[in-house]
């Protein structure tokens, strides 16, 4: 018995389509991650779900990779022409409008991700300052404790000296002794 060939066709049921998309998207992103790790490639993927929700994966700055790609495309003489069907301009206009909406959505997501990155950087810097302040406070506390310990050691040393003097008075100094 040989393997059965799987027929690849579009899924008609919207719920099944969304589930299939989610599962396959995860696999696609995993493969892209492996490609990035194994080959050291900068990978960026932007995928739109059946519900036109954009998902991105890859290099920490997907927009940088996309800009790099677009710069290479504009630098080369290759011009990609859309498939334009004569006499069907309203369908083409609808496609252009849909693509512009998708582009707008992706740009909004990129802007939001950039804002999140800036906020995370700000919080990290704030945490580093807090740690530094906390470290300085600990150092000041340590120095206060160290001074107190030194003062106590000095007091103990003076007490020991006083005890020695009480046991063996220095010649020329008379100590008054209590009468029992």
Image (cartoon, rainbow, N blue to C red):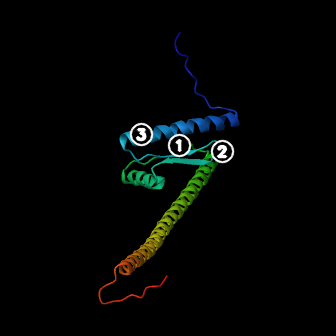
The residue that label 3 is drawn on is 35
Q: What's the residue at 56%, 39% (across, down)?
A: 25
Mark 2 crowdedness (10 Å alpha carbons): few <14, some 14-19, many ≥20? few
Q: Secondary structure at mark 3?
A: helix
Of 130 and 137, the residue lying toward us: 137
In this view, 114 is above or below 177: above
| Residue 100 falls left or right of residue 127 | right
Q: CA distance from mark 3 to mark 2?
A: 28 Å
In this image, 79 relative to 47: left or right? left
Query: x, y (%) of residue 20?
Result: 62, 34
Give the residue furthest to the top: 1
Give the labeled residue for mark 1.
83
Task: List the residue tagged with mark 2.
Answer: 51
Q: Are marks 3 and 2 in contact (CB under 8 Å)?
A: no
Q: Is residue 114 above or below residue 45?
A: below
Inter-mark Cα distance, 1 to 3: 31 Å
Q: What residue is drawn where x is 51% and y is 46%?
A: 82
Residue lying at 70% horizontally and 36% vertically, measured from the top left: 15
Label 1, secondary structure: give it: loop
Residue 120's tag is none
């Amino acid at each position: 018995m040989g393997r059965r060939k799987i027929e690849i066709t579009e899924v008609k049921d919207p719920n099944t389509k969304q589930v299939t998309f989610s599962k396959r998207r995860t696999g696609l992103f995993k493969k892209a991650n492996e490609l990035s790790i194994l080959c050291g490639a900068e990978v960026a993927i932007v995928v739109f779900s059946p519900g036109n929700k954009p998902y991105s994966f890859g290099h920490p700055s997907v927009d940088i990779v996309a800009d790099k790609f677009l710069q290479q495309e504009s630098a080369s003489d290759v011009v990609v022409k859309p498939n334009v069907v004569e006499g069907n301009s309203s369908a083409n206009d609808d496609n252009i409008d849909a693509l512009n909406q998708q582009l707008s959505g992706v740009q909004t997501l990129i802007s939001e991700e950039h804002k999140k990155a800036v906020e995370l950087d700000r919080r990290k810097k704030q945490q580093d300052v807090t740690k530094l302040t906390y470290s300085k406070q600990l150092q000041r506390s340590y120095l206060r404790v160290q001074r107190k310990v030194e003062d106590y050691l000095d007091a103990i040393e003076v007490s020991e000296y006083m005890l020695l003097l009480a046991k063996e008075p220095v010649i020329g100094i008379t100590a008054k002794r209590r009468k029992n």
